[in-house]
Image (cartoon, helix red, strand yellow):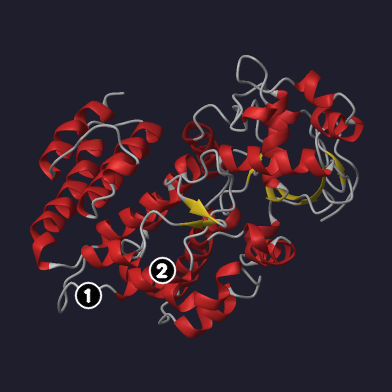
C-alpha cells in the first residue's frame, strides 16, 4: 500500500491523484455488494455542494487497484451493471483502473457532473435536465478541481485482497463507522448474508449472534433492530446465494431513492412486523416479503426519512384468510416473471424494472395501496400478469 502518486499513464498507484475521471469505478464488494446508485450519488453530491466541497472531508477516498485481465471480469461486470441500472445517472467508464471502497458516491457524482449526465436533483440541472460542469464550477474552485482531476485516493495494491481476504470488509467497516448514517438496512442485510455464506462455504454453521454483533461494528442506524434484519436474511434472502436479497439491492439502486434522496429507511416498526408475519406452520412467501420492502423503498410517502406507505395494518392484511388466494397467486406470478425474464434473456436494467414493477404492483394490490402509486387500475393479479410481457420488451 502507498507509494508514489499515480501518473497519467496509470503507472504505480499510491497516495495521490489517479488519471482521467473515467477510470475510477466501484469495488464489486463495495457496501456488501450494494454498490452505488445514481440517484443516491446525485443527492449526496447536492449535499456536498450545499455545504461546500472540502478536500479534508474527501480525504477518506480509498480504493483498490483494478486487477489486470482476466481477473478484472467481475469488476467490469459490476460497474457496467451500476451504469445500466442508473437510468442515465451514471456515465460509462472509459477504462477501469481503480475500485473505490470509500468515497464512491462522491466520485460517482463527480463523474456524472463531468459526463453531463441526467440529473436526479432538479435544482442542479440545466434547461436540458443535465449537469452542466461549467455552471456547477462557478464559485467552487475546489469542486471544479476535483471534477477535473478526480479525488486524491489512498490506493491499495490489487493483490492485497487476495492475500488478506477480509481486507475489503475491514476497510469498509472502518470507513462506515465514520459515515454510519449512510448505511441502509439493505446494505446491512447484504453484509450479514455475506458473513453467513462465508461461514457455510468454510464448512461452519453460521453463528447469527456473532453475525449481528459484527454487522453492528460500524454503528449503523438499524443497530437497535438488527435481530429483525437477521431474521429476514435467514428466511427470505433467497437461498444460500441470496438471490432475492441481491435482486432487492438492484431495485434499491435503481428505484429506492427517487427525488427524496438516499436517506429513507424502512424502520424498526416495519421490519419487526414484516418478520413476525405468520402464514401458518411451515408456510413462507419470501417473494411477497421482498416485494413489501421494494414497495416501501419505491414509495414517495416518506416521513422523517422513514418509508410510510406500508405500515403494520397493511402488512397484517397479507396474512388474512380472505387474501390467501391472492397472496398465493402473487407469489407464483413473481416466480414466473423471473423465469420469463431468463427465457427471454432480458437485459439487466429491463429485468430489474419488469420484476420490480410486478412485485410492487402485487403487494400493493393485496394491501389496497396500489391506487396511491399506480395510475393503471389493475383489479387482479391476473391483470398484473398480462402486463408483464410488455415491460420485458421495453
Element type at marker 2? helix
Who is closer to the viewer here, 75 or 174? 174
Q: How many labels does the image show?
A: 2
Residue 251 showing in the rendered view: yes
Disc on res. 214: none
64 is higher (above) or lower (below) than 20:
below
Please report whichever mark, 2 or 1, sits nearer to the chain's N-terminal start. Answer: 2
Q: Is residue 105 left or right of residue 327?
A: right
4 lies left or right of 235: right
Seen at 81% across and 56% down, the residue is 1
Determine the residue located farthest toward the top in the rendered image: 128
Looking at the rendered image, the quarter that the C terminus falls into is top left
Where is mark 1, residue-wise? 278
Q: Are marks 2 and 1 in contact (CB under 8 Å)?
A: no
From the viewer's perspective, is 349 left or right of 124?
left
Q: Residue 265 placed where, x, y %? A: 52, 59
Q: For residue 162, which quarter of the picture?
A: bottom right
Q: Can residue 164 be seen in this view?
A: no
Q: Is residue 333 above or below residue 284?
A: above
Estimate how packed mark 2 is, as few (under 14), some (14 to 19) or many (20 or more) residues with alpha carbons within 10 Å.
Answer: many
Separation (CA) of disc 2 from disc 1: 14 Å
Q: In this view, does 115 lie above or below 292?
A: above
Q: What residue is disc 2 on?
A: 271
In the rendered structure, the answer to whether residue 51 lies left or right of residue 39 reads: right
Q: Where is residue 389 drawn, in percent x and y?
A: 20, 30
Amino acid at each position: 500500500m502507498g507509494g508514489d502518486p499515480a501518473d497519467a499513464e496509470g503507472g504505480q498507484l499510491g497516495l495521490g491523484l489517479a488519471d482521467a475521471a473515467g477510470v475510477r469505478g466501484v469495488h464489486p464488494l463495495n457496501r456488501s455488494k450494494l454498490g452505488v446508485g445514481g440517484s443516491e450519488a446525485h443527492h449526496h453530491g447536492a449535499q456536498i455542494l450545499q455545504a461546500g466541497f472540502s478536500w479534508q472531508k474527501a480525504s477518506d477516498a480509498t480504493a483498490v487497484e483494478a486487477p489486470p485481465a482476466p481477473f478484472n471480469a467481475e469488476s467490469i461486470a459490476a460497474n457496467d451493471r451500476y451504469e445500466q441500472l442508473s437510468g442515465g445517472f451514471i456515465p460509462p467508464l472509459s477504462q477501469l483502473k481503480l475500485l473505490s471502497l470509500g468515497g464512491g458516491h462522491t466520485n460517482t457524482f463527480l463523474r456524472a457532473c463531468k459526463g453531463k449526465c441526467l440529473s436526479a436533483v432538479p435544482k442542479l440541472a440545466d434547461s436540458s435536465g443535465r449537469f452542466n460542469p461549467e455552471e456547477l464550477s462557478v464559485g467552487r474552485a475546489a469542486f471544479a478541481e476535483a471534477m477535473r482531476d478526480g479525488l486524491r485516493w489512498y490506493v491499495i495494491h490489487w493483490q492485497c485482497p487476495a492475500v488478506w481476504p477480509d481486507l475489503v470488509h475491514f476497510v469498509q467497516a472502518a470507513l462506515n463507522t465514520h459515515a454510519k448514517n449512510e448505511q441502509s438496512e439493505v446494505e446491512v442485510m447484504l453484509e450479514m448474508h455475506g458473513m453467513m455464506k462465508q461461514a457455510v462455504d468454510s464448512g461452519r454453521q453460521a453463528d447469527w449472534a456473532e453475525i449481528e454483533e459484527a454487522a453492528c461494528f460500524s454503528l449503523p442506524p438499524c443497530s437497535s433492530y438488527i435481530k429483525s434484519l437477521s431474521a429476514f436474511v435467514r428466511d427470505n434472502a433467497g437461498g444460500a446465494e441470496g438471490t432475492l436479497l441481491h435482486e432487492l439491492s438492484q431495485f434499491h439502486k435503481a428505484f429506492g431513492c427517487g427525488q427524496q434522496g438516499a436517506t429513507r429507511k424502512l424502520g424498526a416498526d416495519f421490519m419487526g412486523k414484516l418478520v413476525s408475519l405468520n402464514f401458518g406452520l411451515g408456510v413462507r412467501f419470501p417473494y411477497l416479503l421482498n416485494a413489501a420492502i421494494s414497495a416501501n423503498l419505491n414509495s414517495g410517502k416518506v416521513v422523517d426519512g422513514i418509508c410510510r406507505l406500508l405500515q403494520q395494518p397493511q402488512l397484517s392484511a397479507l396474512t388474512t384468510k380472505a387474501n390467501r388466494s391472492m397472496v398465493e397467486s402473487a407469489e407464483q406470478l413473481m416466480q414466473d416473471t423471473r423465469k420469463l425474464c431468463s427465457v427471454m434473456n432480458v437485459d439487466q436494467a429491463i429485468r430489474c424494472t419488469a420484476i420490480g414493477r410486478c412485485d410492487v404492483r402485487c403487494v400493493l394490490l393485496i394491501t389496497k395501496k396500489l391506487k396511491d402509486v399506480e395510475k393503471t387500475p389493475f383489479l387482479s393479479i391476473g391483470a398484473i400478469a398480462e402486463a408483464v410481457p410488455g415491460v420485458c420488451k421495453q
